[in-house]
Amino acid sequence: MAVVARSTKTPRRISGCAHTVPRGFRVLGGWRRPIEARPPMAVIAQPMPTSHRIVLPGGQRQALASWWRTALAYLLLLVLGYLLLTPVFTWSQRRLDDVRYGFPRATQLDGFVGHGDESGAPTHLMALNLRRQISILELPGSDPMKTRVFAGPYLVGSNGLYVVPYLSLEDINNDGQADLLLQVRDEVVVYINENGTFRLITSAERARLVPPGMQGR
């Protein structure tokens, strides 16, 4: 029997960079292997989200900008006017009070309250703001030898030295005698006319004078 010898070819290993890899093959572990075909990939284009911007015409945009500038200018003028005019008004009011009430601030009042004024001479009352302490001086029947002093409230705050105390007479408890009222800022202090002198009103008396719906205010 005849034996035919066949020559077997083994793939040649690539070493170095001298050999060129044929198209359709790739080098893996030093051997040329064919590249497997892959199915084509589908590419889908999607629209990108866009933001909507309102574009004003040129004339309207300029008018809006002009309006904002005008409003800002008026606001700045108001603030500047307030900062400049407030000290002027405060200074003017204090100078006017200096002429009318002096310094320290003092007001005076004459009235018939039944305290030694039977001779026809009224009782002289004076409210004095002396270094923030309010005091009331009474001259019964205008007699300085019988002067009495009643302590009032002590004032706090930056303008306490310039507060004007006001006096008035009114029969608030309907006993036929004029009571003394001292007004300082928005507060009214009541002195009851009793037994030939004045005394501070009590809480019970104040509760009777104030209507029930106003007691908590």
Image (cartoon, rainbow, N blue to C red):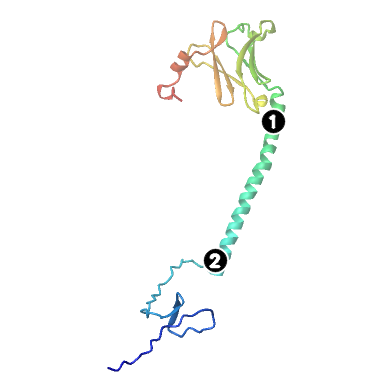
Q: Which mark is residue 60?
A: 2
The foreground one among 22 and 194 is: 22
Position of 149 with respect to 42 (left or right) is right
In this view, 204 is above or below 164 = above
**Of pointers 1 and 2, the one earlier in the residue sequence:** 2
Q: Position of residue 171 (x, y in %)?
A: 51, 15
Q: Is residue 17 above or below residue 140?
A: below
* Residue depicted at 58% across the width and 11% down the height: 113
Residue 102: quadrant of the picture: top right
What number is the disc on residue 103? none
Q: Nearer the viewer, residue 98 or 15?
A: 15
Residue at left 46%, top 80%? 13
185 lies above or below 59 = above
Which residue of the protein is positioned furthest toward the left in this rendering? 1
Whether tag 1 and tag 2 are in contact, CB under 8 A, the answer is: no
Q: Examine the rendered structure and indicate whether residue 156 appears above or below residue 141.
A: below
Q: Is disc 1 placed on a helix, strand or loop?
A: helix
Can residue 195 be seen from the camera position used here? Answer: yes
Q: CA distance from mark 1 to mark 2?
A: 51 Å
The quadrant in which the N terminus is found is bottom left
Of the residues shown, which amino acid type is indicated by label 2? Gln
Residue 161: x percent and y percent?
67, 24
How far across and down, in percent of the image, does residue 83 sit?
66, 42
In this rendering, position of residue 101 left or right of residue 180: right
**Few, some or many residues within 10 Å of mark 2 (<14, 14–19, 20+):** few
> Residue 5: image x %, image y %?
35, 91
Residue at image mark 1: 94
